[in-house]
Image (spheres, helix red, strand yellow):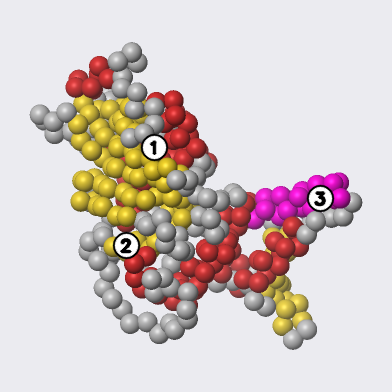
Amino acid sequence: MHLLRVQVPDFRGLKDIDITFEKDFFPKIFPLGSQNGGGKSTLLQLIFVLLHCSVDDAKKPFLQNLLQGFKVADGEEKRVLALIDILEGEKIVKLEFYCGKYSVIEDFLLEEIQPENLIHICSYSSAKQSNNNQEPNTELLCCFNILKKHEAKLFLDKLSHKIFLAAPSTQVFLFLPLDSRKLLFSNSSKEDKNYYAILESARSKLNGLFTYDFLAVKLLIKSFKDARDRDFREAIKTGNYGKSYQTLISDLNLMLSNKRINLNEDFSGVNFQLYKNGETIELYPEDLSHGELKRLSIYIWLKSRNIEDAIVLMDEIEIAFHPDWQYQIISDLKEWGPSNQYILATHSYALCEALTPAHVKEIEPKLIKQESNITNES
């Protein structure tokens, strides 16, 4: 899967967005730059939710949250939300997501006359204010260029498993309920009134969402268990244990230089040790940098989810990275998941300089150029 083009005429802070991600560019890594307030995070969230949630009824509330307040003007039949072109193999599938008032398009919702290339996604409220009693009055639909309805639903389902979003947990996620987002300005300690608890609940339902926590311990333990199981299956098949577990350990330790990571014998967690001058020193969480822990988390997330041939949207990946590591993360992504396409919302010039200028996409207000001392080649 490859995201070829995205167009957003007018959604929240996004105006006249039209970005192309060339299919022949290598690596398939595209920084998306702007200054604060440009709408990078909004754009990534819009793409993710449209492509990840449109065919799963359990996930459609996230679409409804995102679209709340998105109105169709009086006198207009519809309002285009986004146009997204996806390359699958040699086939280009064009998706037009648009919204219309129920009173205008209700005939299309009747199965017997609905156009074959049109899918009804969900209903939502165009009221800007939160109101639990507000009835949905607007419809989200998706029109396809070359696929019939049955084919289109299968394509959206396949695409929903090939789109991922990684973002800092401190990000404001527009697909959470409006009342939940308001909790960021509240000091409530109740679990159901805590923004981060609500985000954790959402993350459990959105299997394509990953937040940059200090260390994804659950994913890390799962990766060790999966590697162990692969080695055991190899032993059953060939009589010799495989090397998946040892390869995983080696890859992780390579990132940590003179530090080593080990799995607790009871699989309850992990521990770290420092080898220095022939001495083994136990390390505590505070002995590892935020950048080290984040880099490990990204690696484990990509490997544990077997993310391949996918569209991976990553917001502010450079947070906690030294400029050298901001540059290095491009090589890391090429190595860790070479078949993926990565779109990286960023403020980092160091990261952008690891690629050709043509790879870098910008939206207004554009990045302010900074001098960099990095001289490595990508």
Secondary structure at badge 1 equals: helix
Magenta stretch: helix, strand or loop mostly? helix
Q: Amino acid at mark 3?
A: Glu
Range shown magenta: 219-238
Residue 234 is marked as: 3
In this view, the residue farthest toward the left is: 75
Report the amino acid beneath label 1.
Answer: Phe
Does the stretch in magenta take in 225? yes
Q: Nearer the viewer, residue 7 or 367?
A: 7
What residue appears at the point 62 percent right and 71 percent down from the top-left corner?
Answer: 255
Q: Earlier in the sequence, mark 2 or mark 3?
A: 3
Relative to 301, is 319 above or below? below
Image spot of residue 71 (x, y percent): 20, 35
Whether residue 117 can be seen here: yes
| Res 363 quadrant in image | bottom left
Read off the residue under disc 2: 361
Q: Are marks 1 and 3 in contact (CB under 8 Å)?
A: no
- Which of discs 1 and 3 lies nearer the camera? The answer is 3
Name the residue at 27% across, 69% down: 367
Q: Decide: few, some or many residues near mark 2? Use Cα within 10 Å; few <14, some 14-19, many ≥20.
A: some
Pointer 1 or 3: first along the chain: 1
The local secondary structure at tag 3 comes to: helix
Q: Residue at point 52% right, 69% down? A: 331
